[in-house]
Every structure is written in C-alpha cells, then in structure tokens.
Amino acid sequence: MGARMKLSDFDFDLPEELIALRPAIPRDSARLLVVRGSEGRLEDRSVRDLPQLLKAGDILVANDTRVLRAALLGRRAARADGPDVEIEVNLNSRLSPADWSAFARPGKRLKEGDVIAFANGLEARVTSKSEAEVRLSFNREWADLDAAIDAAGAMPIPPYIASKRAADTQDASDYQTLFARETGSVAAPTAGLHFTPALLSALAKAGIERADVTLHVNAGTFLPVKSENVSEHRMHAERADLTVASAAAIISARASGGRCIPIGTTALRTLESAAASGQLQPMNADTSIFITPGYQFRVADGLMTNFHLPKSTLFMLVSAMMGLDVMKRAYLHAVKERYRFFSYGDACLLLPNG
C-alpha cells in the first residue's frame, strides 16, 4: 500500500452504543473474535477459550506496566494579576525522577514559575510551557512521587469513556491489568485487562508460556491521525524495555516451533522495535515505531487485542497484520454481532497463519 495509504481507507462506521463504559465481569467472560489466515476466517469465541485456541509451546507476551492515577486536580496560587485558580492536570510521560510532561486545563492560566498545589502536600512547579503541554517539576522523586500521585489523583480513563461518565473507585481496579508491576503508564495496555488468575492457570496447564515486556503508555496513544496521507503521521515516543530473560524465552519458544502472541499492541510494538536489526535483542529505549500495511513482522506471529477506533494508528497496525480488507470485514461482523469496543470492550485474536 505504501505512500498511497489514505486516512479514509481506515474509516468504518461504529454505533456509539457499542463503546463499552465498563468491563465484562468476570474479566475473562469477554467475547473473543478469532480471525484466522489470509482469507480471514471468523469464529465467535470467549476469552476463556484461549487455552484451546493456542497450542503448547506458544508464548504469550504481556506488558507489565502499571497505570498511575495520573488525573490530578490542583490549585495555582493567587498572583498579582488574579486570584488562585483550579487546574486540571493529566500527566503524559515521565521525563526524569521528578519531572513529567502534562496537559493542563485551563493552560492559559499558567506560566513558567507557577506552582500548582495538589492534595497531601504534593506540589509541582511549571518549568516550561508549549502550546499543548507543560513540564512539571514535582517536590518528590521516583517511588515517593508515584505514591503521592496515586494518593492525590484519579484513574486516567480514556477520553471516550470520560466524556460519558466520571472516573470512580471501580476504575482503580478495572483499569489495571493483573500483570501490572512497573509504574509509569497514563493509559492501560487494555488487552491485558481480560486476564484472570484462573485463565493464567488454565494457560499454564495447557503448556502455553509467558514472558513480560514493559512499555509505559502515554496519552499520545489517544492522539488522532490528522494527515490524510498516512505516511506523514509522526508517532509519539514511549519508553520500552525488553529484558535479556524475556528476549531469551521468546527466541527459545519460537525456535522450538511455538508462536509468539503479544497481548496487546504495546507488547507487539515493543517486540518489533527490539527486532529492528532483524534479530530480537534486549532493549531499553524510546520507541516511536509506526506499523502500517506493508510492514513485515519479525517476531509477532499473531496478536490478542481489543477493538480499536476508526482511523487510528492501532487499526492500521491490525490491518498490517491481517490485511485491511480482512480487518474491515471482521469489524463489520463485530458491529453486526454487537461486540463491545475500545478499552473496556471485547477482544480479537489475530492469527495470520491460520
């Protein structure tokens, strides 16, 4: 497809009522649309069927990032030119032990040097400001800062859910995967939300292996593609980490004939970034990999993922794996069968080799 790809190619009609506002309970009771082979054979299954859908020796790769309660409400102190003002802050990505880039509303009421006070003595100074973002330097570092943000903030639920209801205490557990260990994301790697201890136990009994990677998801994941010529879009950068042990486990599983199935697009993007040389290698670096049709996958032999937004980079990624026509037909089927979409919705299992 190359340079001829147009943004409109990746559009489809999605009825608004199919956007899930809460997850399935229990998590593994969500539906799973299996898409197989170059012709895109479709099967309506459940996430609980994963142990039967995969085979012994396959390896699932999860993203073990943990979501911070990164939606903060604070007050900028009064100034000579006006009273104090309430500021909504949504953290974006960590820049150093004490510094984050963030989106602030109303941003026009902030200038360099302002201090925003949050709950429990947490404070941040505005050290720089651009059109869209501010850089905040907090009065804590690393784990102390993470704990203070978690205590002061709310779960940063996605904009298409937040526009319909406020975040609440249920989201604090709903929007965190059971793989979550490494703090640093402001959005969940949502394919991982479908897993339960019972499902992990059933997968292990079936001889299906697991490795973890870490990619700290930032708010760029929700940024729309604005250019009609897809090749002009520039991806946001996110921090990704693949350890020596995880890389070795994946290489070994594939060498023995197993398939590598990332749980979610963030795990897939980490693996493909780590295999940029042609060989999978340990990695700890920023990635801004942008996967569109025509891309040759080096490590991922399939993908478990949620249903994505029309015209999104994530719908482009799944179209790269299965073919645009196949994915359009799969999504048409999902709409007709009333699958639930986006972060809290149902899932698909993409198996390009059948």
Image (cartoon, rainbow, N blue to C red):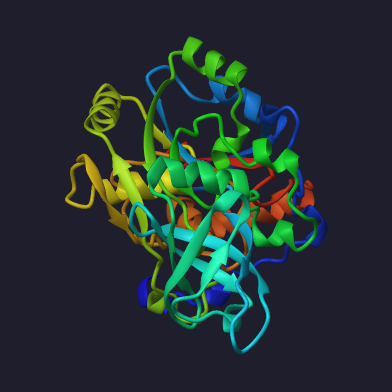
Front residue of 323 and 102: 102
Q: Is residue 299 left or right of residue 26?
A: left
Q: Residue at x 59, y 64 (%)?
A: 89
Residue at horizontal 55 percent and vertical 29 percent from the top: 178
Q: Quadrant of the N terminus?
A: bottom left
The residue shown at (50%, 30%) is 179
Q: Is 273 positioned to the left or the right of 307 in the image?
A: left
Query: Where residue 252 sits in the image (x, y, percent)?
Result: 24, 24
Query: Residue 88, image x and y in percent?
Result: 64, 66
Which image quadrant for residue 45?
top right
Res 238 visible: yes
Q: Total of numbered circles in the picture? A: 0
| Residue 326 sits above or below residue 116 on the image | above
Q: For the view shown, which residue lies furthest in the top direction? A: 205
Give the residue displayed 47% in from the left and 73% down from the top: 134
Give the percent coordinates (x, y) of residue 235: 40, 67
Residue at the bottom extreme, as displayed: 81
Determine whether 202 is above or below 353 in the image: above
Report x, y in % for residue 280.
22, 41
Q: Is residue 67 visible?
A: no
Q: Is residue 251 above or below residue 84?
A: above
Between residues 255 and 28, which one lies in front from this camera angle? 28
| Furthest residue toward right | 17
